[in-house]
Amino acid sequence: MNGQHPFSTAAPGLLLVRGVNWLGDAVMTTPALLRLRERFPEARIALLTPEKLADLWRDHPAVNDVIFPNAGDGAFATAKVLREGKFDLALVLPNSPRSALEVFFAGIPKRIGYARPWRNFLLTQAVAPRPEGMEMHKRSISEINAAIAGHESRINYPSSAHQIHEYLRLVAALGANSAPLPPQLFVTPGEIEAARTKFGLEKISGPILGLNPGAEYGPAKRWPAERFIAAAREIHRQTNCVWLLFGGKNDTTAAAQIQSALGPLAINLSGQTTLRELMCLLKLCRVLLTNDTGPMHVAAALGTPVVAPFGSTSPELTGPGLPGDRRHRLLQSGAPCSPCFLRECPIDFRCMNGIGVDTVVEAVMETWKS
């Protein structure tokens, strides 16, 4: 049965959520999962997620169980694992054909997800896209040049287009409240103290700030490293802070460059933390200065204020926290070609180069004082 009507049969006892594959996207699903728990307080909710994200959900009140396939498992192998769970219902958050195929071959009797090409027949309820939803259109070089020449207006997205509303609409199809909540993650005091001790932070007497100079998607999302260095030096001069440098294995070169320039002002933790340790350390930070990337969303969901330069992407679509949250400062240059959603800038990187060091320092200090 395809349709858009709220789920109205008996509440499921065993409910599977097919989760998303990227860290930032996973954080943005938490409002929907919390609403799902609110709708079905007695259900046992299992989340299917990549192994790299499994620890994100430890101690999360919306999730009872976490399932992750073995590396390299295809849709059929994943379906075999799911079949053992004997789930009553599956909610499919990604839009891919594979995610629908997994729950179809698992034999889960009720399967809800967005209507998309090549997969609607795999679902028992295909939910129509939101009228307010907007695609992240990658601009061609001709479109970029037209925008710069003034022949095309800059793309502006309403806050109602934010990605968290996409997931909330899906749980609303099950009768859940679609009113937005802030994304939320949880760590325990014991975990925080263990991370503080492991990385020698108990010796720090001054304020701790975080700096995350990488971005998994590509260089178009990265504010220049030399500007991070200049901003970090000035903010230290004003606050006497210690910087924690974060990042994954692919960010170690940029973090090492910044560490070398800052010397004793910074502690380089790039590539050294587990996901849970990253969460604990972000929770310790008074402010996180970061590019638009997964740890930005994690920090905001843990209650840490974020300052982030945005260039090729749109804060209206994928900004941290609840749209409009004034704790966070999301900076843009106003370049007419931004957002382009490209991995690499095909012209002169004006979207990021137009965000000055003074602007970032001022934003961090405003956040510091608020």
Image (cartoon, rainbow, N blue to C red):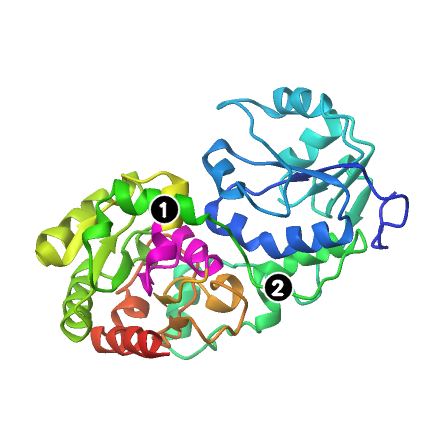
The residue depicted at 52 percent of the width and 59 percent of the height is 137
Residue that badge 1 annotates? 278
Give the x, y percent position of residue 222.
30, 57
Based on the displayed image, in which of its 4 quarters is residue 147 positioned? bottom left
Of callouts 2 and 1, the N-terminal one: 2
Image check: 260 left or right of 208?
left
**82, above or below 127, in the image:** above
Whether residue 76 is visible here, answered yes or no, is yes
The residue sitting at 27% across, 58% down in the picture is 211
Amino acid type assigned to the residue bearing label 1 in the image: Leu
Chain part drawn in magenta: 281-302
In magenta stretch: residue 28 = no
Q: Quadrant of the C terminus?
A: bottom left
Q: Which residue is mark 2?
A: 181
Q: Position of residue 130 (x, y in %)?
A: 70, 61
Graded by Cα atoms within 10 Å as few (under 14), some (14 to 19) or many (20 or more), the crowding at tag 2 reads some
Residue at position x 46%, y 48% in the image: 187
Task: Examine the structure image and report whether residue 290 is included in the region drawn in magenta.
Answer: yes
Callout 2: SS: loop
- Determine whether 184 is above or below 274 in the image: below
* Amino acid type shown at disc 2: Leu
Whether residue 216 appears in this view of the structure is: no
Query: On the rendered structure, is 242 left or right of 32?
Result: left
The part of the image, by quadrant, that contains residue 43 is: top right
Of 54 and 355, nearer the camera is 54
Q: Is residue 48 left or right of residue 342?
A: right
Q: Residue 331: x percent and y percent? A: 36, 72
Query: Considering the numbered disc 1 on the image, is that residue within a helix, a strand or a loop?
Result: helix
Picture coordinates of residue 87 (x, y %)?
76, 31
| In this picture, residue 293 sits left or right of residue 353 | right
Between the C-alphas of marks 2 and 1, the distance is 23 Å
Using the image as rendered, state which of residue 66 and residue 170 is in the foreground.
66
